[in-house]
């Protein structure tokens, strides 16, 4: 039986990890790190809800740490299969995973200093830089749009998801017990008309669509509107003699910002202010961008063909060294500072916040998603004070956000993308989102397309198995299956009891009336189960809780017959 377990990315945006299992194989889609509040982050340190050594392969949608960040831990714990990803994703992971390993080492050292002072035992890092480097050996680079056939009855293809450089929608064709099904994992679905990279590909068909819903309840500004907002925020901040501090993800948002800022300066819509890219990872990933023209849209390709480099221009200063970063903190106004991490939980951005949050003239501008429990989310939600490096900081700066810079599709873009699927999926499973946006999106998908939508929970496991009773809706059918299972369990429980009682009666009881009543009760239960199991014979579709089994021929002729014989 084909089953799917949600080991992350279920009713939360981060920690993407999905375990797909047949009778013969176990594979993963993504192996990401949980980000946000402490409760979420603690999941990173527990055991995997599967044995890594039993996983045959991993399919990676893209390089963001919430999708890739636990790969070194997976390898450390015994995984030895291939990791399939696009060429650009593999190149980005060669930068991002060792960098993450460095962060794990630094966090462990900080915690261990405290532990030593308190006399507590020390802990190991989640993984080290070397363990991250070791994990890179398992990457297998795959071109977009190429169907790959693997040995264990599985084929796949990577399609462009339009989220970041190298991001992919994963199409999986799985054969289980002679039945071939197609599952599509969107990963993070991107937006139309983003700068630099291509729009998301349209998928022609799917049996099961695992669809992201990060912004299932939100609408982003359009391209023109977001550029207007950016211009207004920059100019108004400069008028107040402040700095513009932009917490930005090193991959994707930083490069798009540079692209648009260059245009604004060229058109004279903002002054040629100094723009500091103060993130070593952002600097290195910007170089990777230039190497992957296969991901560029037509406008970016035309720029490159003319010999232009829209990510490198005179006003952009890249500051890889710590000394250069510290110098930026001496600037009291008139600069734009782009730094990581995008959610303000780590990295150099925390230093820039410390030096600018208390300044009334400055602006902190968010251009990406802020998970619950993150420093960025606290600021967006109106925090009056925050603590940075043990110091309480009063928030006097303007806190602004431009949703149009998000790399995630908004509600309308998700609905539009789904509506273009030619052969509509039998089942849509919503992932990568908090509960409220997912519920909202599910209602819209059901209303607009008549879609059957399911929202799984963390660590829930569902079975992908045949359904499809004529004239019965899927939800009603699943309810009927659950009822059938209850009758089956009742039958098995009572058959054992009655079998024991029958033996006692045969040995001790000679009351024919009692024996006939017992036999009639057994027969009634058997007929109930046989009717239900006949009713449940059906053809292909969807999901159901794993405890709901198909009551087909095997059960009728096997379990039921055996119980009857008892």
Image (tube, rainbow, N blue to C red):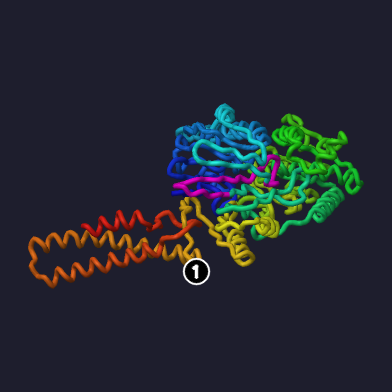
Report whether 361 appears left or right of 435: right
Kind of element beneath mark 1: loop
Please state the horizontal and vertical placement of residue 14, each as a whole percent of the image: 58, 47
Decide which of 394, 496 is in the foreground and name it. Answer: 496
Residue tagged 1: 471
Q: Is residue 498 visible?
A: yes
Image quadrant where residue 160 sits: top right
* Quarter containing the C terminus: bottom left
Query: Badge 1 local density, few (<14 within 10 Å), some, or many (20+)?
Result: few
Report whether 197 appears left or right of 525: right
* Residue, far right: 268
For the point 52% across and 37% down, the residue is 57
Span highlighted in magenta in the image: 161-183
Q: Main secondary structure of the magenta part?
A: strand
Report whether 434 appears left or right of 234: left
Report whether 540 appears left or right of 421: left
Image quadrant where residue 207 sits: bottom right
> Is residue 132 one of those drawn in magenta?
no
Please state the horizontal and vertical placement of residue 498, each as a whole percent of the image: 20, 62
For the point 82% across and 45% down, the residue is 260
Please state the horizontal and vertical placement of residue 144, each as a whole percent of the image: 67, 40
Q: Is residue 385 visible?
A: no
Q: How many marks?
A: 1
Please state the horizontal and vertical placement of residue 405, each as a whole percent of the image: 74, 50
Decide which of 193, 312 is in the foreground and name it. Answer: 193
């Amino acid at each position: 039986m084909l089953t799917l377990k949600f080991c992350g990315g279920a009713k939360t945006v981060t920690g993407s990890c999905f375990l797909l299992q047949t009778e013969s194989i176990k594979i993963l889609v993504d192996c990401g790190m949980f980000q946000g509040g402490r409760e979420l982050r603690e999941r990173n340190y527990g055991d995997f809800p599967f044995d890594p050594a039993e996983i045959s392969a991993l399919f990676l949608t893209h390089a963001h740490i919430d999708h890739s960040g636990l790969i070194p831990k997976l390898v450390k714990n015994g995984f030895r299969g291939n990791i399939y990803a696009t060429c650009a994703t593999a190149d980005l992971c060669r930068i991002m995973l060792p960098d993450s390993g460095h962060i794990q080492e630094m966090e462990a050292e900080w915690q261990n200093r405290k532990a030593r002072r308190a006399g507590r035992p020390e802990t190991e890092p989640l993984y080290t830089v070397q363990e991250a480097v070791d994990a890179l050996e398992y990457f297998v680079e795959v071109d977009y749009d190429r169907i790959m056939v693997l040995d264990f009855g599985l084929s796949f293809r990577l399609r462009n998801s339009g989220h970041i450089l190298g991001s992919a929608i994963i199409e999986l064709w799985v054969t289980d017990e002679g039945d071939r099904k197609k599952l599509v994992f969107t990963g993070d679905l991107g937006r139309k008309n983003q700068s630099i990279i291509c729009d998301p590909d349209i998928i022609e068909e799917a049996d099961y669509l695992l669809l992201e819903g990060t912004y299932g309840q939100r609408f982003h500004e359009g391209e023109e509107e977001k550029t207007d907002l950016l211009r207004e925020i920059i100019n108004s901040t400069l008028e107040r003699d402040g700095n513009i501090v932009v917490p930005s993800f090193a991959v994707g948002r930083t490069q798009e910002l540079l692209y648009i800022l260059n245009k604004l300066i060229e058109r004279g819509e903002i002054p040629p202010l100094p723009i500091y890219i103060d993130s070593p990872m952002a600097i290195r990933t910007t170089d990777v961008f230039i190497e992957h023209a296969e991901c560029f849209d037509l406008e970016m390709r035309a720029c490159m063909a003319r010999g232009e480099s829209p990510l490198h221009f005179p006003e952009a200063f890249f500051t890889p060294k710590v000394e250069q970063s510290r110098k930026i903190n001496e600037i009291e106004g008139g600069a734009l500072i782009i730094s990581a991490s995008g959610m303000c939980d780590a990295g150099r951005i925390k230093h820039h916040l410390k030096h600018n949050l208390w300044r009334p003239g400055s602006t902190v501008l968010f251009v990406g998603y802020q998970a619950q429990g993150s420093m960025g989310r606290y600021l967006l939600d109106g925090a009056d004070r925050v603590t940075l490096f043990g110091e309480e900081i009063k928030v006097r700066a303007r806190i602004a956000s431009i949703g149009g810079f998000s790399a995630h599709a908004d509600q309308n873009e998700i609905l539009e993308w789904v509506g273009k699927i030619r052969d509509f999926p039998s089942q849509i499973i919503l992932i990568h989102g908090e509960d409220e946006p997912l519920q909202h999106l599910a209602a819209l998908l059901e209303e607009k397309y008549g879609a059957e939508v399911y929202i799984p929970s963390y660590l829930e496991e569902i079975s992908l198995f045949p359904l499809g009773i004529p004239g019965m809706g899927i939800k009603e059918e699943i309810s009927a299956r659950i009822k059938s299972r209850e009758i089956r369990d009742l039958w098995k429980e009572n058959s054992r009891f009655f079998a024991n009682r029958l033996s006692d009666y045969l040995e001790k009881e000679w009351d024919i009336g009692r024996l006939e009543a017992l036999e009639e009760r057994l027969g009634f239960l058997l007929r109930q189960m046989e009717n239900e199991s006949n009713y449940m014979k059906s053809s292909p579709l969807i999901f159901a809780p794993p405890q709901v089994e198909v009551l087909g021929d095997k059960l009728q002729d096997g379990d039921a017959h055996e119980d009857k014989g008892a």
